[in-house]
Image (spheres, coloured by chain):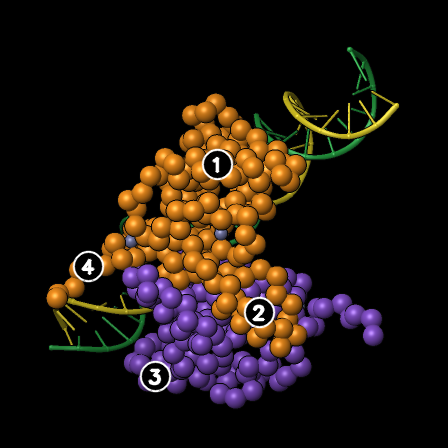
Chain colours: A orange, B purple, C yellow, D green
Amino acid sequence: MANQNLGFHSDHDHTGCIEQALEGARALCSERNLRFTPIRELVLKTIWQSHKPLGAYELLPALAEAGFNSAPPTVYRALDFLQEQGLVHRIALLNAFIGCPHPNEQHQGSFLICKACNNAVEIDTDEVGQVINSQASKLGFIPEKQSIEVLGTCPECVPDKLS
Amino acid sequence: MANQNLGFHSDHDHTGCIEQALEGARALCSERNLRFTPIRELVLKTIWQSHKPLGAYELLPALAEAGFNSAPPTVYRALDFLQEQGLVHRIALLNAFIGCPHPNEQHQGSFLICKACNNAVEIDTDEVGQVINSQASKLGFIPEKQSIEVLGTCPECVPDKLS
DNA sequence: TTGTTTGTGTTATATTGTAACTTTAAAACC
DNA sequence: GGTTTTAAAGTTACAATATAACACAAACAA
Ligand SMILES: [Zn+2]
Ligand SMILES: [Zn+2]
Ligand SMILES: [Zn+2]
Ligand SMILES: [Zn+2]
């Protein structure tokens, strides 16, 4: 489960990247006695292939090509499953889904999202997350799910400055 | 601009609350030489009346009653304006809009959202926001807009525990 | 007052997400 | 193995959210 938190730099063995994610998902489902069905696998694979946040409807063609039913409920069910198992995160600001590089570690998905290239990278916000949660608790609020998303420009898309 | 950050406790003079928000908006627009048109005012007023996150389509009836055109573009235009001026925030997790209690202070809108009563209160996340931003900058990412939203249960909706 | 900008009216449509019911396939049980 | 039960997928229809595009009108600037 190494080499998957590559930030915005896209020069990596992406084929291995995908296969690694799928292998991890297989193991995770097996461990939890869950069915990693062909549709679920195909949806996860398609998400990882793009390596960018993908809208639900962008997943439908892949299902159609593979001969599956490709109506919205099919893909949303698969996405629900994958989200519940922490294999993908939903990015609220984009209405889109992205694969999680470390689904075994308990966490919320926090993202830096580039407006220019539409890439998103997951960042660790455990510390600030805890601060926010304790702040919430002080108000008597019981936090359950946290969403931290930052829109901006990634290093690949920053116009090189003088100097 | 006091007494507006009341957390989840709803026992306050809400009429004054609304009028205060409208008065602030008038002042703000006047200061910035912007037109606080009847439609914009009505949308903001309706949002404050609910005092809960409100979907765009929930604003249409109020426009209709007041004799305005009540097609979606009308309300989305008003919402765009109000958002740009910081008078309302959009809550991505809910696809909903809520009035900002302190539109003059530069900030992002961060929210605690109760799943039970659907209330949302804005919290101050300047400190954690800065931590996140500096973390982003270290990765070469230039942050522009930040979204922090926490789903959970508010104190009014927590079933009283034994003891 | 003439042109320009900004806001609104209007129609149509795009995008995202669910409800509800049927059919199929897998698992559990005997 | 055959039966019951449960979970997943197929299918149809639709709800909810958001935007494109163009016409019109009011406000503003010259
Ligand atoms: Zn993750
Ligand atoms: Zn980029
Ligand atoms: Zn605010
Ligand atoms: Zn509540």
Q: Chain of mark 2?
A: A
Q: Nearer the N terminus, badge 1 or badge 4?
A: 1
Please, which chain is the residue tagged with disc 3 on? B
**Label 2 element class:** helix
Q: Earlier in the sequence, mark 1 or mark 2?
A: 1
Judge depth for marks 1 and 4 and give the one in front: 1
Q: The residue under label 4 is which amino acid type?
A: Pro
- Amino acid type at circle 1 is Leu
Q: Residues within 10 Å of mark 3 (few under 14, many from 20)?
A: few
Q: Name the residue tied to disc 2.
A: A133
- Residue position marked by numbered label 4 in the rendering: A159
Q: Does residue B118 appear in the picture of this structure?
A: no
User: Which labelled disc corresponds to residue B10?
Assistant: none
Q: Are marks 1 and 3 on the same chain?
A: no
Q: Which mark is residue B30?
A: 3
Front one among A114 and C18: A114
Residue wearing tag 1: A22
Choose mark 3 or mark 4, whichever is in front: 4
Marks 3 and 2: which is nearer the front?
2
User: How much space separates mark 1 and mark 3, taking CA atoms?
Assistant: 57 Å
Q: Do the numbered discs 1 and 3 sit on residues whose CB atoms are within 8 Å?
A: no
Query: Where is residue B58 shown, x and y percent of the image?
Result: 54, 61
Q: Amino acid at mark 2?
A: Asn
Number of marks: 4
Which numbered disc flags the more N-terminal residue, 2 or 4? 2
Circles 2 and 4: CB atoms closer than 8 Å: no
Give the amino acid at mark 3. Ser
